[in-house]
Image (spheres, rainbow, N blue to C red):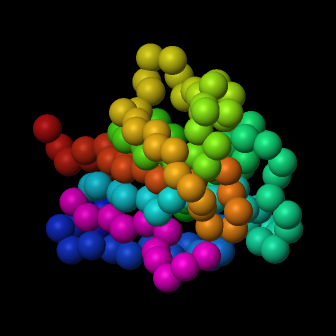
């Protein structure tokens, strides 16, 4: 697989959380990596109850994003943009922000949009998708 191919690679990763709908965990083309929204499910126990509360669910979602990125040879530092979805926006926004921010260096926060929604799959309080970029490894 060419890491900088303009032909998309569709990644369904065996160690990532089980998809709850028909999608790939990530799609990659020309160094861009688009990650499907992650839910607060445990990849080791996909049928287990979700963690309670926005803090625990946000931590689980971030861990799932990290897991998908790691499977692709990347990490959170490669994320350029996130879209965040909250079912209890007014109640959870402040706690979500603090928890989310704790996963990134203060001087390297991705661009972000956060939206309040009426519902998410599996009864989650939060879902996050993101766009990452592979470092340019071509010779200068």
Vertical order, 126 against 23 (above or below): above
Asked whether 107 or 123 is in front, the reply is 123
Name the spot of residue 68 as percent of width and height, x first: 55, 59
Magenta stretch, overall SS: loop
Seen as rendered, the residue at the extreme top is: 107
* x 40%, y 36%: residue: 112
Query: Residue sitting at 72 percent across and 41 percent down?
Result: 54
What stretch of residues is rendered in magenta? 20-30
Residue at x-position 36% and y-position 33%: 111
Find out whether residue 110 is within the magenta segment. no
Could you tell me residue 90's position as x and y percent?
Answer: 61, 33
Q: Nearer the viewer, residue 64 or 78?
A: 64
**Residue at x 59% of width, y 75% of height:** 19
- Please tell me whether residue 2 is drawn above or below residue 106 in the rendered image: below
Residue 75 lies left or right of residue 53; in this view the side is left
Residue 67 visible in the current orientation: no
Question: Residue 1 versus residue 33: which sits nearer the camera?
Answer: 33
| Relative to 101, residue 49 above or below | below
């Amino acid at each position: 697989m060419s890491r900088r191919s303009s032909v998309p690679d569709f990644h369904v990763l065996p160690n990532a959380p089980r998809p709850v709908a028909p999608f790939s965990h990530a799609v990659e083309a020309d160094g861009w990596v688009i990650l499907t929204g992650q839910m607060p499910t445990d990849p080791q126990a996909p049928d287990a109850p979700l963690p309670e509360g926005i803090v625990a669910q946000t931590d689980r979602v971030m861990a799932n994003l990290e897991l998908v990125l790691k499977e692709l040879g990347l990490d959170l530092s490669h994320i350029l943009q996130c879209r965040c979805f909250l079912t209890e926006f007014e109640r959870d926004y402040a706690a979500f922000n603090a928890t989310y921010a704790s996963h990134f260096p203060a001087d390297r926060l991705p661009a972000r949009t956060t939206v309040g929604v009426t519902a998410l799959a599996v009864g989650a309080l939060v879902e996050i998708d993101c766009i990452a970029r592979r470092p340019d490894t071509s010779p200068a």
